[in-house]
Image (cartoon, rainbow, N blue to C red):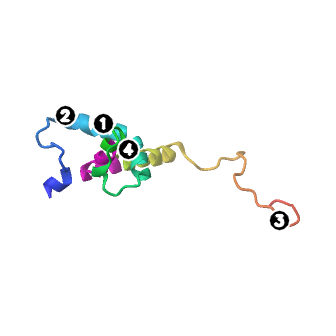
Amino acid sequence: MHAKWLAGCQWTGKSDLGKTAYVLSVVALAPLACLVYVGSPYRNHSRVRHPVLGPLLRLMDRPINRFIVDMASYTVFLFFLLMSIQKGISRKEGDPQVTEYVNDDGTEF
């Protein structure tokens, strides 16, 4: 299970600083890697021979990297959710109404 989860990543031999740098590099490459991963026509990325896209696709094939990207995405989602709650999203008096409904005769209600 350990070998499948890490899939060739030398995680256990890295120092704490090395692990932190690895996680930060995966998170930094995540947007580009996810776009390339979604646009890839291959299911098995070990056969991709492109000098730039191949390593990015193989990077996202590791379960630990997908987990890191998922957790980073979820953290960003929670950050935006908490910011919207903190700033308040309720309509204040005097603000224009977001949705206006119109009757068949053209009057608003």
> In 3D space, how far apart are the residues under numbered discs 3 and 4 (Cα atoms)?
49 Å
- Identify which amino acid the numbered label 3 is placed on: Asn
- Secondary structure, magenta segment, majority class: helix
Image coords of residue 74 (percent x, y): 38, 50
Label 2 environment density (alpha carbons within 10 Å; few <14, some 14–19, many ≥20): few
Q: Is the C terminus in the top left, top right, bottom left or bottom right quadrant?
A: bottom right
Q: Residues within 10 Å of mark 1 (few under 14, many from 20)?
A: few
- Separation of disc 2 and disc 1 at Cα? 10 Å
Residue type for callout 4: Ala
Q: Earlier in the sequence, mark 2 or mark 1?
A: 2
Range of residues picked out in magenta = 56-71
Q: Amino acid at mark 1?
A: Ser
- Mark nearest the camera among 3 and 1 is 1
87 sits to left or right of 96? left
Mark 3 and mark 1: Cα distance apart in space: 55 Å
For marks 3 and 1, the one nearer the N-term is: 1
Measure how far apart labels 2 and 3 are at the Cα level: 64 Å
Give x and y (percent) for residue 43.
34, 58
Q: Are the residues tagged 2 and 3 within 8 Å (C-beta)?
A: no
In this view, the residue farthest toward the right is 105
Check residue 18 in the rendering and tell me which mark sits there, or answer none: 2
